[in-house]
């Protein structure tokens, strides 16, 4: 077992996934995730239920990650955890667990910014992952964030643009809920859209000045449209589900694509690096790939397993902190609104 490389146990618990991973250097030995199905019943994440579920899942998930990696906890070099941003109750469970384990094993602690982790997955050493060069344009698209980030170095990131209201994933989920789809709706909309017509219905693309985006307008337009149509025909959603999904998805993706184009041009960046749950979206992936030639971009799309929340992304970020011996303290607090 690779004796000279550092072994990092990473824990991620910022929202509704309880995740643990073991990395040896930049290689992922295990990447385990326990999803919390309880939130489906409520059509969205219920923070209190998420923290309770983290409490019951964290020990089995960490155990599973160590077993799959074939590592004994006494062989570990450091413990990494998500410090923020995220839901406070969820962050506290992972943070407290990581701190307790670090004290028990007398290991250094490495607190990680979740959003930095989403972008640093591209530095994992694995077949199929190509690593970008600094500086590049990082785009984080998830259920909680939509950000365009100038990435100058592993931990030197400057937010150039962000959503002023809803995140792109939130828009997928809320519009999906309006169509009666389960939470999270993003993956289902993606699937249903494959056989739908993206030009059947038109939803507005906001014309925002600067590098910020907005998703609340399209969400409201979509909700009002559904309301109006179902008054005339109560079966409207069922009869048009695939076209509704395709048209909505097309609009949500165009909003971020337009901004990526503007920012890339303004900052003269030709490496576009995508991270976060919505990076799994096939329309976004296709549209970006189509622009490789026309815009002379190098596009970095993470493998699907590293798009939605996972602990390998926390582990790879921790690897770079470990090289610099940038450790955290037992007194560090979880931060719901941690900035880059
Ligand atoms: O990064 P993530 O797991 O959690 C946050 O940090 O928010 O992202 C979850 C989001 C959800 O909104 C989910 O609907 C969306 O990612 N998502 C997708 C797809 N897969 C996940 N959205 C569109 N298409 C997908 N294929
Ligand atoms: Zn995330």
Image (cartoon, rainbow, N blue to C red):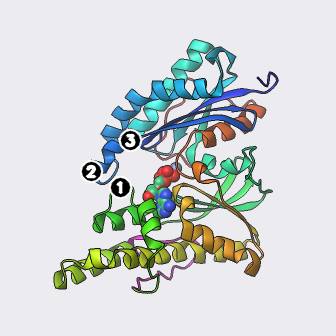
Between disc 3 and disc 2, whose residue precedes? 3
Q: Are marks 2 and 1 in contact (CB under 8 Å)?
A: yes
90 left or right of 207 in image: left
| Snapshot quadrant of residue 201 | bottom left
Q: Which residue is mark 2?
A: 42
Q: Regarding mark 1 in the picture, which secondary structure is present there?
A: loop
Q: CA distance from mark 3 to mark 2?
A: 12 Å
Residue 139 on image: x %, y %: 62, 62
Residue 237 on image: x %, y %: 28, 75
Between disc 2 and disc 1, whose residue precedes? 2
Q: Is residue 324 visible?
A: no
Q: Which residues are magenta?
A: 201-218
- Above or below: residue 258 compared with residue 165: below
Q: Are marks 1 and 3 in contact (CB under 8 Å)?
A: no
Judge by depth and name the residue closer to the eye, 18 or 66: 66
Judge by depth and name the residue closer to the eye, 109 or 169: 169
Q: Is residue 162 visible?
A: yes
Residue 203 on image: x %, y %: 41, 82
Q: Residue at x 37, y 77 (%)?
A: 244
- Above or below: residue 324 compared with residue 179: above
Please say whether residue 72 is one of the residues in the magenta stretch.
Answer: no
Q: Which mark is residue 183?
A: 1
- Above or below: residue 35 compared with residue 322: below
Q: Residues within 10 Å of mark 3 (few under 14, many from 20)?
A: some
- Above or below: residue 234 compared with residue 167: below
275 left or right of 235 in image: right
Judge by depth and name the residue closer to the eye, 27 or 14: 27
Q: Which residue is mark 3?
A: 36
Between disc 1 and disc 3, whose residue precedes? 3
* Quadrant location of the N terminus in the rendered image: top right
Residue 273 on image: x %, y %: 68, 60
């Amino acid at each position: 077992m690779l004796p000279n490389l550092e072994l990092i146990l990473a824990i991620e618990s910022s929202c509704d996934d309880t995740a643990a991973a073991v990395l040896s250097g930049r290689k992922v030995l295990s990447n385990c995730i326990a999803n919390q199905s309880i939130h489906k019943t409520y059509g969205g994440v219920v923070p209190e239920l998420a923290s309770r579920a983290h409490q019951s899942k964290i020990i089995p998930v960490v155990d599973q990650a160590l077993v799959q990696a074939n590592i004994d906890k006494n062989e570990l070099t450091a413990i990494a955890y998500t410090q923020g941003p995220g839901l406070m109750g969820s962050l506290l469970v992972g943070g407290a667990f990581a701190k307790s384990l670090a004290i028990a094993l007398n290991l250094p602690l490495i607190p990680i910014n979740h959003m930095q982790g989403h972008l640093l997955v591209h530095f994992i050493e694995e077949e199929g992952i190509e690593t970008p060069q600094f500086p590049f344009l990082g785009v984080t698209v998830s259920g909680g964030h939509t950000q365009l980030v100038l990435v100058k170095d592993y931990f030197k990131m400057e937010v150039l643009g962000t959503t002023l209201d809803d995140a792109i994933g939130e828009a997928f989920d809320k519009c999906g809920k309006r169509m009666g789809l389960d939470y999270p709706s993003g993956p289902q909309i993606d699937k249903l859209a494959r056989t739908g017509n993206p030009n059947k219905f038109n939803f507005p693309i906001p014309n925002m000045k600067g590098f910020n985006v907005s998703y609340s307008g399209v969400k409201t337009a979509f909700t009002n449209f559904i309301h109006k149509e179902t008054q005339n025909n109560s079966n409207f959603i069922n009869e048009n589900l695939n076209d509704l999904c395709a048209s909505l998805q097309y609009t949500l993706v165009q909003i971020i694509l337009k901004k990526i184009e503007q920012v890339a041009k303004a900052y003269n960046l030709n490496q576009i690096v995508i991270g976060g749950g919505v990076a799994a979206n096939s329309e976004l992936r296709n549209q970006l790939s189509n622009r490789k030639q026309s815009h002379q971009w190098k596009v970095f799309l993470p493998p699907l397993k590293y798009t939605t929340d996972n602990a390998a992304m926390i582990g790879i970020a921790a690897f770079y902190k470990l090289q610099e011996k940038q450790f955290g303290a037992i007194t560090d607090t979880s931060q719901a609104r941690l900035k880059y």
